[in-house]
Image (cartoon, helix red, strand yellow):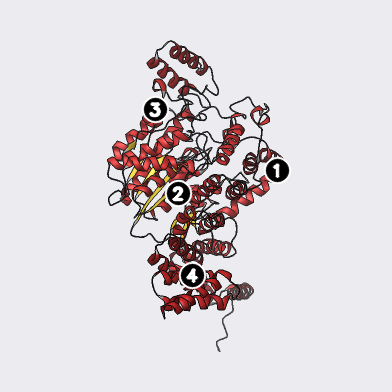
Amino acid sequence: MKNSPKPQKHSTENKYNQANNKTKAASVKKNELPASKVQRKEDLKDGSKRKYPRWFYLVPVLIPVIFFILLEGGLRFFHYGKDIETFIKISEDYPDLLFMNPQVPFRYFSNLKTAPSVIPDGFQEVKKSNTFRVFILGESSTAGWPYVPNASFSRHLRRKLSLLYPKNNIEIINLGITAVNTYTMRDLLPDVLKQKPDLIIFYNGHNEYYGALGAGSSESFGKSRALINLMLKLQRFKTFELVKNTIRYFAAIFHGAEDSAAENSSETLMSRMVGESLIPFNSSTYTSGLKQFEGNMRDMLEMTKNAGVPVILGTLASNLKDQHPFISVNASGRERADMVYKKAQDCLSQGDYTGAKKLFIMAKELDALRFRAPEEVNNIIRRLGHEFNYPVAPVEEDFEAASPYGITGNNLMVDHLHPNLKGYQLMGESYYKIMKKYSLLPKGSQALSEKSADSTLKANFPFTRLDSMAADIRLRVLLGSYPFVPKGSPNHLLENLRLNDFVDTLAGMIIDRKTYWEPAHIKAAEYFYRKKQFTAFKKEMNAVIEERPFNETAYGFTADMLIKANLFQDAMPYLLKLQTMKPGAFSTKWLGLIALNGKNYKEALYYLESSLQFSQDDPQVWYNLAGTYFNLKRIDKAFDAIKKCLSISPGYKPARIFYAQLMLAAKQQK
């Protein structure tokens, strides 16, 4: 029997299972990823373990850095904003000289359209071997306010040292700026040290509260010393200036009217810097100001010490006897400043000078409007001098010694803290004596005695009535305004001002900024010249020359005017200085003529022949040269010179007469 196939059990179920398995296999195959995609998926899972090149991590950091570098470079390339470099060249006329940049104060007065002026003390870009270079850092008292710089103690020092050491090139650079404090000086000092100073002098401390960026100033970045000094460093970058100007622009949209009113008001810079800030004795702001002063001074003295530059500090003088406290406040446990001041006056009238002095000092200490430095500032100055082994000029002590009862008042001060003319000269002497005591004077022997130098300084003080009147008007502006009078009060001092003559009018124009100081002096000089007041003419021009000693134009103008008035001997010093600064046809011609008139024939020959090196077209030079040759018995040369003179100017009558005399003399000799 043939075997028949075994019957399939559950055939229907098996077919279903097979079909189901095929469906699953197809589904798996459909959802299966290619090998490359599986690998990428694994790479993503392991991405944190993968190492990228270093530049990959640097790019996010470098992008903003590169952006700001390009932005800064672009702003500088297109000369955006103000040039606030500390020292610059200001004119092609003085290619070898550097000056303090007039824009520098804008670093510290960002909210003012017109910043305080700087003193144009020029110095050689490349320091000469015989140069004695001193920088003076300070505030308005250093600048010589309310007077012109010629009256400042720095100019007294410069004039005295120039007389005593004529072989040295004396450079005294005054960096005093009104309404600044140690923040400004600390910011300037690194640039000062780059200029290789032989000495740095400080006279500062009165403005530590209300000066720009000070503890109580309306012009401030806050009270953090580190933050303020950082902000001052950032001011050097154009990008920072762009950000600051942008903020100011949008702020002006909302507060423009107020800012304009403040800027255009009759308030003095002094009152604007104060705002409403009162600083009672021993308050937190009072203490902050002292810490600010000591911290910034310490930073500066560490800089100078590391640079090996000598320094002289100075104690601060202020008006104790004749300055009533500005604002008195009621404080627990203390008397009001005005009451203490009244007691001091009573003691003084009763002959108790020691008691009066103590009370005057205490009245100043309790004055809540802190324009005069606290006594602790002088204590800090003395302490830092001892710590850093730097001498301290006893300015305060010298003022007291020169004052009745040993109490400084209006005998040496014009207001609360600015010295008068005598006071500024006394300051100069205070520093000079310390320079002498500690061997900080120029090298070499002195050309004359100090007594002779002082006598010469007194006789030739370059300060005129125009300067005096301008200072008087400045004082009236200050003393007739807040805080010397109540806010809103009319300035009666200005209302009572009378301008009596042309010079007074010029002074008023200077203060109103209708003219500048130098052209005003030249106009005054011309005024006196027309009136044949030649001494007054010279005094005005001497003031200009002292203020701008590097400007040969002033020497030439003065000499020329005196020559036209036949004052040849008076013109001589100006011609000699001009010849030293910038030899030319003008100076050599007239020096030769003056020497010829004085029968100094060899000297005349030197100058007149030198004049021909600059120009051979002046008949007067040839004429005088012919006379010089004749007196030196060089007749042939005299003939040649007079012929040259007549060839240039055939109608020159004196030359024709002299030529005829030469011809006659030659015939007689034959």
Tag of residue 34: none
490 with respect to 385 (left or right) = right
| Of labels 4 and 3, the one closer to you | 3
How many numbered marks have been drawn onto this rendered protein structure?
4
Placement of the N terminus among the 4 image quadrants: bottom right
Quarter occupied by residue 536:
top right
Give the crowd class for mark 4: few <14, some 14-19, many >=20 residues within 10 Å: few
Q: How far apart are marks 3 and 1 (CA)?
A: 50 Å
Q: Name the residue under label 2.
A: 188
Q: Earlier in the sequence, mark 1 or mark 4?
A: 4
What amino acid type is highlighted by mark number 3?
Ala
| Of labels 4 and 2, the one closer to you | 2
Q: Earlier in the sequence, mark 2 or mark 3?
A: 2
Q: Distance between the residues labelled 4 and 3?
A: 90 Å
| Of labels 2 and 1, the one closer to you | 2
Give the crowd class for mark 3: few <14, some 14-19, many >=20 residues within 10 Å: some
Q: How far apart are marks 2 and 3 (CA)?
A: 34 Å
Q: Distance between the residues labelled 2 and 1?
A: 31 Å
The answer to whether marks 1 and 4 mark residues whose Cβ atoms lie closer than 8 Å is no
Tag of residue 256: 1
What amino acid type is highlighted by mark number 4?
Asp
The answer to whether marks 4 and 3 mark residues whose Cβ atoms lie closer than 8 Å is no
Viewer-side residue, 542 vs 211: 542
Eyeballing the image, is 584 above or below 473?
below
